[in-house]
Image (tube, rainbow, N blue to C red):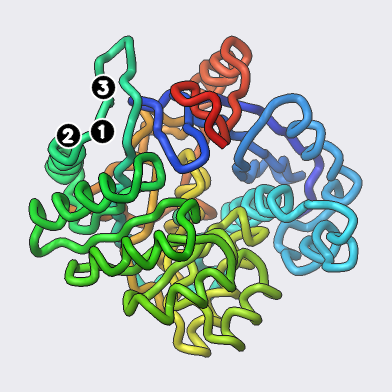
Amino acid sequence: MKIVDLRATTVAVPLEAPLRHANGAHWGRFIRTIVEVVCDNGVVGLGEMGGGGASAEAAVMGLKPYVLGHDPLQLEQLRWKIMNPVGSLYNARAQLHAAVEMACMDAAGKGLGIRACDLLGGALREEIPFASYLFFRHRNAATGAGGETSADEIVAHAIDLKTKHGFTTHKLKAGVFPPAHEIEVYRALAAAFPTDRLRIDPNSVWTVEEAIHVGRAILDLNNDYFEDPCWGLEGMRRLRQFVPIPTATNAVVVNFEQLAQSIRQDLIDVVLLDTTFWGGLRQAHKAGTVLETFQYGASVHSSGELGIQLASMLHLGASLPNIGFAADAHYHHLTDDIIKGGPFRYKNGSIALPKGPGLGVELDRDKMAEYAEHFRRLGGYAYDRDPARPNWY
Ligand code: MG
């Protein structure tokens, strides 16, 4: 099998309502670049990358000299071609590589009639549990959805998501309101779901002292972990001296150098593995096996995926032995997807690993055209700006 063409298409898929976070908001849509590798036997492999527009598409197209003629099954060669550690001093290709590698694993799997997880050693589970990812949302003016600020409103939103999807783990995306309010909201969730699991993530916005204060105020709850309450490996190290809740990060351990430092100095308990931040599904899987060796926790991170990347997350969650927690997904906040058969569905809080070869998803080209047009109409947005608080940095 040889790759004969590479394609990149930016799409914008609407969210039910804008999602707020510590340093900005998702303004009502997710913008993603869909990457396709076309092979000489007619197989098309699918990958996905965060962000989009002309510069993102051009960056993917810039990889053509590395990718055309490449055998998609030669995944380690691909990594060294695109993402070798010396070269990466001069470029930032980890996420580009991730999208192309995802597409190659999909193509290789489809060519061989095996699933992407089989290229990682096979599936240990067929159902991947997820957390209800709860956000303070702006109201969608067109539909009236969203607008949650109070504890009662967030609990009502969580009950709605649990009713629809069956979640038994709840994650609050915090860092939007002062810590006292977010403690009240988080404790209200704990009271509403006394047997469910909880986690809180303010995207590193609190000082170490604020994080200690919040940690001490939630010590008695069913916490999976305390996710990026403050910034940096050193901030997380200090926090741990005062708060006996396992810590987790998707922000400050996102490559192997940081993983080595975190383990060597025993800085963070759980690493949330992202199939794009780490440079691909295989890299996230490798990091997971390092965590297994040293007996640290691992889970699956969400960076705002459509169905292609969600499929990569399912294959990661299925193949790593040491996944100790429900995965995260922004996925249920989307109104639609660009894959055939419509969006993945949750059952009892889990999503089934696809049965088909490769990633197990196919592109719905009509949907892709519709949402490519949606992107052309609306353009991008600044992830780190919230239109409701324009002077917030
Ligand atoms: Mg996080």
**Comes first in the chain, label 2 or label 3:** 3
Left or right of 105 in this view: 317: left
The image shows residue 287 at horizontal and vertical percentages of 58, 74
Of residues 108 and 30, the one nearer the viewer is 30
Can the viewer see residue 126 in this picture?
A: no
Residue for point 15% across, 42% down: 155
- Above/below status of 183 relative to 293: above
Amino acid type, callout 1:
Thr
- The reply to whether discs 1 and 2 touch (Cβ–Cβ < 8 Å) is yes
Residue for point 27% across, 14% down: 143
The image shows residue 252 at horizontal and vertical percentages of 59, 64
Amino acid type, callout 2:
Glu
- Above/below status of 163 relative to 70: above
Residue for point 47% across, 26% down: 389
- Within 10 Å of disc 3 (Cα), the crowding (few <14, some 14-19, many 20+) is some
Residue denoted by label 2: 153
Of residues 251 and 387, the one nearer the viewer is 387
Could you say whether the residue bearing mark 3 is in a helix, strand or loop?
A: loop
Residue denoted by label 3: 145
Residue denoted by label 1: 149
